[in-house]
Image (cartoon, rainbow, N blue to C red):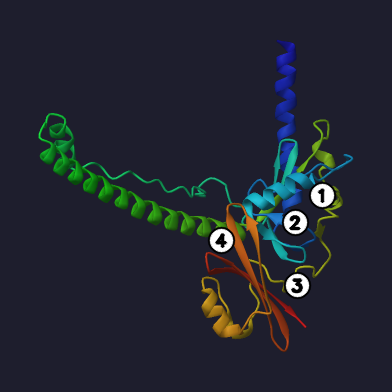
């Protein structure tokens, strides 16, 4: 009984400490703009950082999440620190919208297809043909059955094609949301780390290899949140043909896989800049501009 009372007392006393720690961290970082040094996946799972361990960041895990969820930020991109939350033994250091996949985000891209049902005529023929003995009549009924089944198969094929198109659109929409949804670092400490050690200085040290906290690091980098002025007034949602009409023939075209989608990248050059445009299903989802 005494041990239980002591445990409850420790828990109660610890809450204000963590609350105060979070207030200090929020005041230090929230609303500030930083610049990323590494690629960040477009998911609320973000990247796990374990300061003080031999391998603080699991790069294989980062690579897997980038492949599965796409890239929300690239090295050099600016991002606003939107939220810092102390959650037990780790700190959520959220960038932009904190990463797609939190409560309320619909990540389902599956489109199901219901097979076309048999018509009443087909059902009746299947029943009647079993008792018909006349070869001519039986053949005529089987021929009609074949036609009805073929029509049902064509309907299934049409529905499957429409479902595939709808699923591709849903996947492209989710990819756009992931790109615009930000990301986060989950800074995980050992359980014996007390809240007083979770200071702004320790957070900056933990993220020093991945985040530039220096004044003015935000700049005007091209990010999903603040696109710079671009030649021809590019904007998300334009088609490949529309972009080509504005920018001219691309200097190079390449592609990469992000999750189940193929992202096509076209590079354009103007007198003053290099523009990289990224397309999913022929729709512009992101672009960056580098002055030359």
Which residue shows up at 53% across the image and 56% down it?
174
Residue corresponding to mark 4: 176
Q: SS at mark 4?
A: helix
> Which x, y percent locates residue 30?
70, 57
Q: Are marks 2 and 3 in contact (CB under 8 Å)?
A: no
Q: Which mark is residue 265?
A: none
| Structural distance between the alpha carbons of marks 4 and 2 | 27 Å
Tell me the CA gap for discs 3 and 1.
22 Å
- Give the Cα distance between marks 3 and 4: 23 Å
Label pair 4/2, CB-CB below 8 angstroms: no
Q: Secondary structure at mark 2?
A: helix
The answer to whether the residue labelled 3 contacts the one labelled 1, judged by CB atoms less than 8 Å apart, is no
Question: In the rendered image, which quarter contains the N terminus?
Answer: top right
Relative to 162, is 135 on the left or the right?
Answer: left
Closer to the chain start, of discs 2 and 3, is 2
SS at badge 1: helix
Where does the image place residue 86, in percent across and percent down from the top left?
Answer: 71, 42
The residue to which callout 3 is attached is: 219
Q: Are marks 1 and 2 in contact (CB under 8 Å)?
A: yes
Which residue is tagged 2?
A: 29
The residue labelled by disc 1 is 203
Q: Is residue 193 above or below residue 27?
A: above
- Mark 3 vs mark 4: which is more N-terminal? 4
Nearest to viewer (mark 3 / mark 4): 4
Distance of label 2 from label 3 (alpha carbons) = 17 Å
Rate crowding at label 2 as few (under 14), some (14 to 19) or many (20 or more) other CA atoms within 10 Å: many
């Amino acid at each position: 009984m005494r041990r239980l009372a002591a445990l409850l007392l420790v828990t109660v006393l610890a809450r204000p400490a963590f609350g105060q720690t979070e207030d200090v961290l929020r005041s230090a970082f929230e609303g500030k703009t930083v610049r990323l040094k590494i690629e960040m996946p477009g998911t609320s799972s973000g990247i796990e950082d374990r300061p003080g361990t031999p391998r603080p960041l699991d790069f294989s895990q980062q690579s897997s999440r980038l492949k599965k969820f796409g890239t929300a930020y690239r090295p050099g991109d600016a991002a606003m620190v939107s939220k810092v939350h102390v959650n037990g033994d780790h700190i959520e250091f959220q960038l932009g919208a904190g990463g797609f996949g939190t409560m309320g985000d619909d990540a389902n891209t599956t489109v199901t297809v219901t097979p076309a049902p048999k018509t009443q005529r087909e059902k009746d023929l299947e029943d009647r043909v079993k008792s018909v003995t006349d070869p001519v009549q039986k053949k005529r009924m089987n021929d009609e059955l074949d036609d009805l089944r073929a029509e049902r198969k064509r309907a299934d094929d049409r529905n499957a094609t429409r479902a595939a198109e709808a699923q591709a659109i849903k996947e492209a929409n989710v990819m756009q949301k992931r790109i615009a949804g930000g990301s986060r670092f989950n800074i995980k400490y050992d359980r014996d780390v007390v809240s007083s050690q979770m200071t702004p200085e320790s957070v900056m040290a933990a993220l020093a290899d991945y985040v530039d906290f220096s004044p003015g690091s935000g700049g005007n980098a091209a990010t999903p949140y603040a696109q710079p002025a671009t030649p021809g007034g590019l904007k998300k949602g334009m088609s490949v043909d529309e972009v080509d009409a504005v920018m001219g023939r691309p200097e190079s075209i390449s592609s990469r896989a992000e999750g189940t989608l193929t992202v096509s990248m076209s590079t354009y050059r103007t007198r003053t800049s290099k523009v990289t445009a990224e397309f999913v299903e022929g729709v512009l989802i992101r672009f960056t501009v580098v002055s030359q």
